[in-house]
Amino acid sequence: MDKSLSLVHVKLLAFDLLSLAQSPTNPPTFSRDGASLSRAEALGVVVSREHKPDRFLKFAVDDGTGCVPCVLWLNHATSPYFARQRPQGVRLIADMANGQASLVKLGSVARVRGRITSYRGAVQITVSSVAAERDPNAEVLHWLDCLKLARRVYGRPRS
Amino acid sequence: MASSGPAVGSGAPVPLEELRPPSPLFADGASLRVLGKLQEYSVETTVAIIVDAGASLKIDTQHLRDLHFRVGSIYQFIGELQVQPDNEAVLRARVGRNVDGLDLNLYYQSLQLVRQFQAERTRYQST
């Protein structure tokens, strides 16, 4: 399976991202038309937001073709993974994550990048970075990027 | 249009002029994304009226927070349509934002392209 796309944050429309093929393995791997993907970029209006301080920020972005569930982990202080690392470094990562969490506001547009993961069988993004997009044309440009990349780079659909 | 996330579905973008029978999007409960220029807004009723290309739509904004309404600005709303028996419709907005500066031509042309792409992919994935 072609692995080159798994190295980049693949820009995908929500309906495309949510219909990726999932392998039955645990954890599942994701693919689109035979190309293996592991990271994605989504852009849309934040339509739901659930914040549990020091645990996570769960939110969904709606780009007009679907709603992508996203999770930004904020549990650095209690996570066994971070317990093995230097506290100052963990502090920096936690501050950055919390800063990004505050950018995610209901009704605003967010550009989300992260790993494609699965929760209860459904595709979601585990956020590595999220940024607010103020330019109203950003969404439209993202749509066009997704179309162009899907047609020219990710493989052509048989019609 | 189906969502695998929270309870409500994704708002399907639809130009106001398309939002009337017999369009399948003109249905009670349909999750939609609309935009238009704010023609009037009532603070008492919290109903806004947006217009675009000769068509207009009432928006129920009572659930929106932190949105400043300015007549003449362009707004985008995502929410559910409520259709009354006489075909009067109001969009109950969940979120809204000012989109002044949006290139409307580009928006509508791109929307067409996205719809075509979605149709192609759906056909492809069912074969």
Image: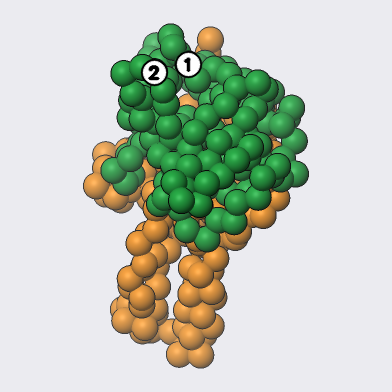
Chain colours: A orange, B green
- Disc 1 and disc 2 in contact, CB within 8 angstroms: yes
Give residue A84's quadrant in the image.
bottom left
Q: Nearer the viewer, mark 1 or mark 2?
A: 2
Give residue A99's quadrant in the image.
bottom right
**Quarter holding the N terminus of chain B?**
top left
Q: Which residue is mark 1?
A: B20
Q: As displayed, is residue B21 above or below residue B83?
A: above
Is B96 on the left-hand or right-hand side of B9?
Answer: right
**Quarter holding the C terminus of chain B?**
top left
The disc numbered 2 marks a residue on which chain? B
Q: Residues within 10 Å of mark 2 (few under 14, many from 20)?
A: few
Q: Are marks 1 and 2 on the same chain?
A: yes
Mark 2, secondary structure of its residue: loop
Residue B86 in the image: state x and y as whole percent.
Answer: 36, 17
Image point 42% across, 63% down: which residue? A72
Is A127 on the left-hand or right-hand side of B16?
Answer: left
The amino acid marked with disc number 1 is Arg
Is A112 on the left-hand or right-hand side of B51?
Answer: left
Is residue A48 visible from the viewing direction of this image?
Answer: yes
- Residue A152 is labelled as none
Q: Which residue is mark 2?
A: B87
Is residue A153 visible from the viewing direction of this image?
Answer: no
The amino acid marked with disc number 2 is Asn
Q: Earlier in the sequence, mark 1 or mark 2?
A: 1
Q: Residues within 10 Å of mark 1 (few under 14, many from 20)?
A: some
Front residue (pair B121, A60): A60
The disc numbered 1 marks a residue on which chain? B
Q: How many marks?
A: 2
